[in-house]
Image (cartoon, helix red, strand yellow):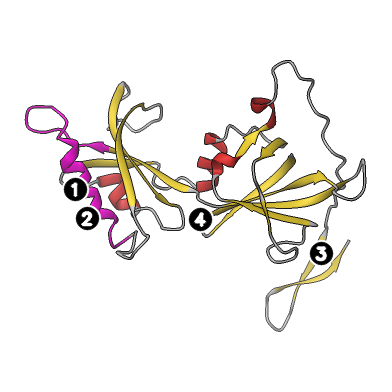
Amino acid sequence: DMFWMDAAERRGDIYLYGKVASPTEPNTFVSCCAVVKGVQRNLFVLPRLDENGEYVDMTLVHQEMKSILQPSCIPKVVGASWAGKVVERQYAFDDPDVPRQKTQYLKVVYDAKYPSPTEEVCHSGGQYVQKILNGKAPILETFILKRKLMGPCWLRIKAPQPIKQGVISWCAIELEVESPKQVNRLDLVIEAGTAPRASPPVVSVTLKLKTIVNPKTQKNEIVSVS
């Protein structure tokens, strides 16, 4: 169990920072960094309408997405792939070109270490693709939404594997998991009615930087930290 307080993304992986119970000292907590691998980018592709006002066949959309993604986003090498399936979603934002009612989209997933299509392609689409939604959403945002994380809280991490301490952070304990599905909010997996678990003690620090302009370089330089 880990109390997470902060998170970051790097090269397609999610880094969770927080505290866990000390494995050697009872009733104490130590810092922990958990690396979540296997994160996938999620795109939702809206088909174009044909001359009859009907959405084009998803097979055509799938074929066009292949040309959009490979090789500009996903290299044509062994192990680099993507998958798509038809899903039904309801749009709730401010683009007037996207229908508000429930509509069928092609959901596309692939390794988050690969980039999303360009903003121009996402907005303007192509011959059979009208728009690509969620293309510019940070993978950290997608992870937090899909795992239903609500600010700092307790997590239950299943089958974590240890990493040699000091390799990826300054935390006392470092571990990794192969899938985001191994990370769950604790209150969603424990027995209903269980009393909330108290958060661990936290020590905070505030840095105050004072700068001056170097008269020779005309650049700001730090003169003190307090």
- Which callout, 4 or 3, points at the residue further toward the start of the chain? 4
Q: Are marks 1 and 2 in contact (CB under 8 Å)?
A: yes
Q: Position of residue 195 (x, y in %)?
A: 79, 20
Q: Indicate left or right for 194 with 142 as reference.
A: right
Badge nearest the viewer, 3 or 1: 1
Question: Given the image, on which type of amino acid does mark 4 rest?
Answer: Gly
Q: Is residue 59 within the magenta segment?
A: yes
Q: Residue furthest right?
A: 26
- Near mark 2 (Cα within 10 A), the count class, few <14, some 14-19 or many ≥20, is few
How would you rate the neighbour count of disc 1 (Cα within 10 Å): few for under 14, some for 14-19, many for 20 or more?
few
Q: Secondary structure at mark 3?
A: strand
Q: Earlier in the sequence, mark 1 or mark 4?
A: 4
- State the residue position of label 1: 63
Label located before the other in sequence (3 or 1): 1
Q: Which residue is label 4 attached to?
A: 12
Residue type marked 2: Ser
The residue tagged 2 is: 67
Choose mark 4 or mark 3, whichever is in front.
4
Q: Residues within 10 Å of mark 4 (few under 14, many from 20)?
A: many
**Residue to which mark 3 is pinned:** 210
**Residue nearest the observer in this picture, 170 or 224:** 170
Residue at the image point whose x is 40% and y is 57% from the top: 115
Residue at point 17% right, 40% down?
59
What distance separates the C-alpha of mark 1 from that of mark 4? Answer: 25 Å
Tell me the distance, in whole angstroms, between the alpha carbons under discs 1 and 2: 7 Å
Query: Which contiguous range is marked in magenta?
Result: 46-72
Q: Nearer the viewer, residue 128 or 20?
A: 20
